[in-house]
Every structure is written in structure tokens, then in C-alpha cells.
Image: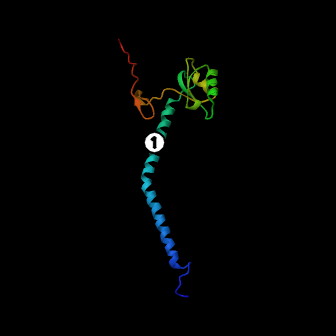
Amino acid sequence: MTGRVKSGSASSRSGRTSARDAERGSSLLRWSMWRGPLLVLAASLLVWFGGMFLVFENARLGDEASGKMLAVFGPGATPEAGFSAIARAGGEPVRPLLGGFAWVAHSREAGFAGRLKQNGAVAAYGEITLSAGAMLAGCAAWVRHRSPPLRVTP
């Protein structure tokens, strides 16, 4: 009876412990393999969000602004609500964007951005310009100036 090994003895426990340690080591190896790329991704997103915040804060219009602008309404706003808010503010809706909670709108009357905010807009944005007259042209591109339209002469 003394030669038999019980299931709860030290020799069977050491087999379970070594398997658990091997499993823990492989998960640590997997984490150390992904730590660098995940940190680079997190840093890139932080820089991108910070830059976009600065760009949009620069493009925010004051209440006295007029002309063509992007009117942003709260999440869940219907296209009909945005359209009617622009009409009540004395502007012309140009086209809906982002599922209808953002609209390109136009008015020549001074104070259009303020009237949009009084009628439910969260913010009004003008052209998004960076430094030295550069403008955003899509997600990551930018242009120095607008080119005149090409004209073909016969």
C-alpha cells in the first residue's frame, strides 16, 4: 500500500503545475509579441483624435457667421428635423450628410450659424483649413489652394 501513488499526492500535483506554468508562459509570450504594435496603434489614435479635435475646433463658426457651412445636429436627429431647422433659421439646405444628422446649408444673411444653433444644431463648421491656407481634402490628404476649373477650348 505504500508503493501506490494517490491521486492527490505531490507527484500528480507537480504535473498539473508544470502544465499550468507552460500555459501561463505561452500567454505571456503572446502578450509580449503584441504589446509593441498595440502601443503604436494607441499612440497613433491618440495623435489622430487630438489633431482632429484641433482642426474641428478651428473650423467652428461663431454665431454671426453666414455663407455655406456644415450644420451638425444631435445623434438620432432625423433628416426631416435637420431640414426644417435649416428652413426655420432662414437658410437653404444643400444636402444631407452622415445619415441626416449633418447638413450642408447656405444663407447669405448674417447670424445664420447662431440661428441654426437656436433651432437645434449642436455646432456649425466652415471650411476646414490648416495652416498657411492648406485645406483638408479627404481623410488624410491636404491641398495648398484651389485650382481653377479646367476649360477646354475648341
Q: Is residue 72 something that shows in the picture? A: no
Given the image, on which type of amino acid does mark 1 rest?
Val
Q: Which sits in the foreground, 115 or 74? A: 74
Q: How many marks?
A: 1
The quadrant the C terminus occupies is top left
Q: Where is residue 78 in the image (x, y as percent from the top left)?
A: 63, 30
Q: Position of residue 67 (x, y in %)?
A: 53, 20
Q: Vertical placement of 52 versus 132: above or below?
A: below
Q: Where is residue 18 in the image (x, y as percent from the top left)?
A: 48, 71
Picture quadrant of residue 1:
bottom right
In the picture provided, is 14 more to the left or to the right than 73? Answer: left
Q: Is residue 18 something that shows in the picture? A: yes
Q: Write the residue at 42% across / 56% down.
A: 33
Q: Vertical placement of 72 versus 43: above or below?
A: above
Q: Which sits in the foreground, 10 or 48? A: 10
Q: Write the residue at 45% across / 29% down.
A: 129
Under tag 1, what secondary structure? helix
Q: Vertical placement of 12 versus 143: above or below?
A: below
Q: Which residue lies furthest to the bottom in this view?
A: 1
Q: Give the residue number, with chain letter if any, for mark 1.
A: 47
In the picture provided, is 147 more to the left or to the right than 69? Answer: left
